[in-house]
Amino acid sequence: MYGKGIIKGLGVTIKHFIQTYIEDLRWIGKGRYYTEAGVLQRMSPETRGIFTIQYPEEKMPVPEEFRFIPFLIYEVDENGEQRDRCTSCGICAKVCPPQCIWIVRTNDPKTGRPIPEPEEFFIDVDICMNCGFCAEYCPFDAIKMDHDYELTVYNRHATNIYDKAKLSKPVSYYESIRPINYTREEEARAEAEAAKAARKAARG
Ligand code: SF4
Ligand code: SF4
């Protein structure tokens, strides 16, 4: 019959409308809006009533494997010096499907030999398709996918080619956004170091 579907749809809307007020009453004093607990409750399958998130005031937490623009990892040595993990091997630039990575290498002026850290490293973030290939293929765990998805700018031509300074973040940041991956990689690294030391000891 004509109009039956419309009435049914409106019934669903009214149900959510009423349930929103019931849930709000249940959450009095606990902060259903603009709090982490409130966001998580509205994201859960058990939620009733309104389930929308008031972005940008509220943000949904992203899972560890969420990936957006890549970033470069640096370590800080015992002298407080910043050390890039990147060796400018160029594998990431080679595998990048839309070819949006550009690396500038340099040589030591005294020896003429290549310096393993990149002089410059650019990613055109307007072209990056967030595939994560660069991070997957990097043999040095030097490039990883970031969780930061808020890239809105007024002038993308002037700002959306990220350079090395903008791409570089400390390893502690990587640990904070991807703790499971970080722990797994550190364990693998420690095992590899131990195996290397054992081989060296065996050779005498
Ligand atoms: S980020 Fe990794 S793959 Fe890319 S150039 Fe540096 S070391 Fe090589
Ligand atoms: S995420 Fe994909 S598209 Fe973006 S820089 Fe890495 S390889 Fe290229």
Image: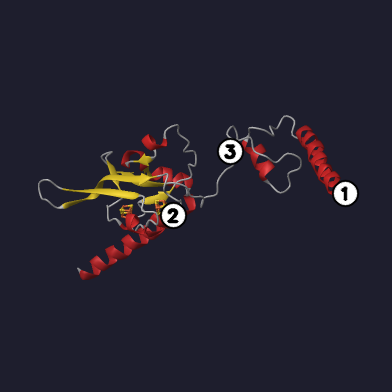
Report the Cα–Cα distance between label 3 and label 1.
41 Å
Report helix, strand or loop for mark 2.
loop
Residue, far bottom: 203
Q: Position of residue 157 (x, y in %)?
A: 38, 37
Q: Earlier in the sequence, mark 2 or mark 3?
A: 3
* Residue 122: quadrant of the picture: top left
Upstream in sequence: badge 3 or badge 1 = 1
**Mark 2–mark 3 CB contact (< 8 Å):** no
Residue at the right extreme, as displayed = 1
Give whichever of 70, 102 is nearer the camera. Answer: 102
Residue designated by label 1 = 2
Residue beneath the point at 24% across and 66% down: 200
Foreground tag (2 vs 3): 2
Q: Residues within 10 Å of mark 3 (few under 14, many from 20)?
A: some
Residue 176 vs residue 108, the one in the foreground: 108
Queried on whether the Cβ of the residue with tag 2 lies below 8 angstroms from ligand 2, the answer reads yes
Query: In the visual, does 13 lie left or right of 108?
Result: right
Q: Is residue 183 above or below residue 119?
A: below
Q: Which mark is residue 132?
A: 2
Q: Amino acid at mark 3?
A: Lys
